[in-house]
Image: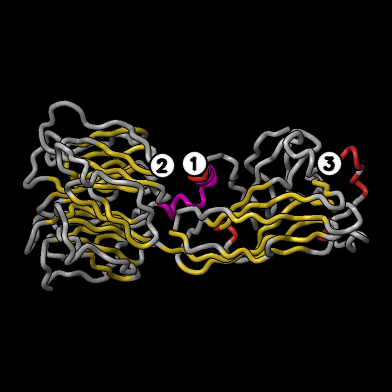
Amino acid sequence: MGSDHDRVSGSALLVRVISAGTVTLALVSVGVLGVGAATASSAGAAPTAGAQLSVTPSTALDFPATPVGLVSTPITVRLTNTGTSNVLITGFKLGGADTNDFLGNGTCYTTATATLTLNTPTANVVQAVLLPGQSCTVAMIFNPGLLGPRAATLTVVDNAAPTVLTLHGTGTEGYYLAASDGGVFAYGNGPFEGSLGNVGIRSPVVSMATTPFGTGYWLLSREGGIYSYGTTAYYGAAAGALNAPVVNLAATPTGIGYWQVASDGGVFTFGTAPFLGSMGGRPLNDPIVGMAATPTRHGYYEVASDGGLFAFGNAQFHGSMGGQHLNKPIVAMAVTPTGGGYYELASDGGIFAFGNAQFQGSMGGRPINQPMVGMAVTPTGGGYWTVASDGGVFAFGSAPFYGSMGNKPLNDPMVDMASTTAASYQQLFHQPAVRARVVGQHLGHPGWKTIKAH
């Protein structure tokens, strides 16, 4: 016993199996008590006389506002047998509209065999017994997949009266700004994980990228240096002599690799990021200024200052501003969460939408104090932000404004911005293995498993 299991059938809480030795004081062996005769009340039978389960401190679990893709601190409740008969816990069920947004763990689990199967048609497969006065704990976390209020219920399946916990939280979002000296500024509920500000670097920062689940970010210097913060890992950097300076960084959708692109179109890959081609060594009318990856890891784009766009791998070309009149040069680009479209941003704030990218407005033709340098799309794709070199932030569509460095003193100009949660997050939210790994890393242990509820 004591092994972890990833999948069960039926609606279920995400669980980690605790070995019987670990919880001997709380949970008694099924075989010792002969609990097979007990019947869970949720199966339709009346509660066992004298079986009573109490929840402390409360059956209402209200989580703090949490950015989409990030993980709240756990809320733990204690289940105590306050009756005179044994309480048999046979499982937990998540219900309600937003079951995918809440994960759990705890000590209310034991098995009579080495295999865990929770909430299946087979009665009493997973059994935990609380003698009168004994207790166990359940810990829940909030990992929102969408903005706004999220709610679910957690039902304890046992032989006592029905016990239902209510789960509530609100999904929020935010963004980061990066300056050329490596300073990082966090807005909304994005966690500040550190920066190079006031450290002193030999090559200026030119770009930044976040992990898909918002648990960290990278900074990229013009000579290809990589600086990682939060749960991000260092996978390497462009070393040695470069034919042209590095200008932009894009992370893989899983966050375990990244691409760097140089102004001559050369692409450098690290971690699991595959090389799918580049404009390096090929004629360009104007230098490359940005890049963006598709949500599948198997494609990316390069964009030049004249608006020319180049697609590689499974990235689809939907058009560009190349060969068309521009009032000001293109400085950045961003891909929609589905990968079916993209935006080009000009230094005067003009935005150009292609494919399924929806135009939500721009600063083009309107006065701005300093030129635009970067943009980011919201995780849901309903809006976007742009940032100017003086730190001014402009929000469009459903993108909320959380603040900016506009009209505030800066040691060096802004060069880029990124959403706290990458747009590719929505494509990964329902991939259990990826989500469990990231959540486990964030909480410091791998015990939070992705097991879907009905």
Residue under the image location 33 percent in, 60 percent down: 187
User: What's the amino acid at mark 3?
Assistant: Val
C-alpha span from label 3 to label 1? 31 Å
User: Camera-side residue: 248 or 306?
Assistant: 248
The picture quadrant where one finds residue 321 is bottom left
The three-letter amino acid code for the residue at tag 1 is Gln
Chain-order first, disc 2 or disc 1: 2
Q: In terms of depth relative to the viewer, which is nearer, 143 or 327?
A: 143
Q: Which region of the structure is painted magenta?
A: 425-441
- Residue under circle 2? 231
- Rendered image coloring scheme: secondary structure
Residue assigned mark 1: 441
Sequence-earlier tag: 3 or 1 = 3
What's the distance in space between the residues labelled 3 and 2, CA to CA? 38 Å
| Label 3 neighbour load within 10 Å: few <14, some 14-19, many 20+ | some
Q: Which residue is mark 3?
A: 28
* First in sequence: mark 3 vs mark 2: 3
Residue 437 located within the stretch drawn in magenta = yes
**Kind of residue at disc 2:** Thr
- Residue 267 position within the rendered picture, expressed as x and y whole percent measured from the top left: 21, 36
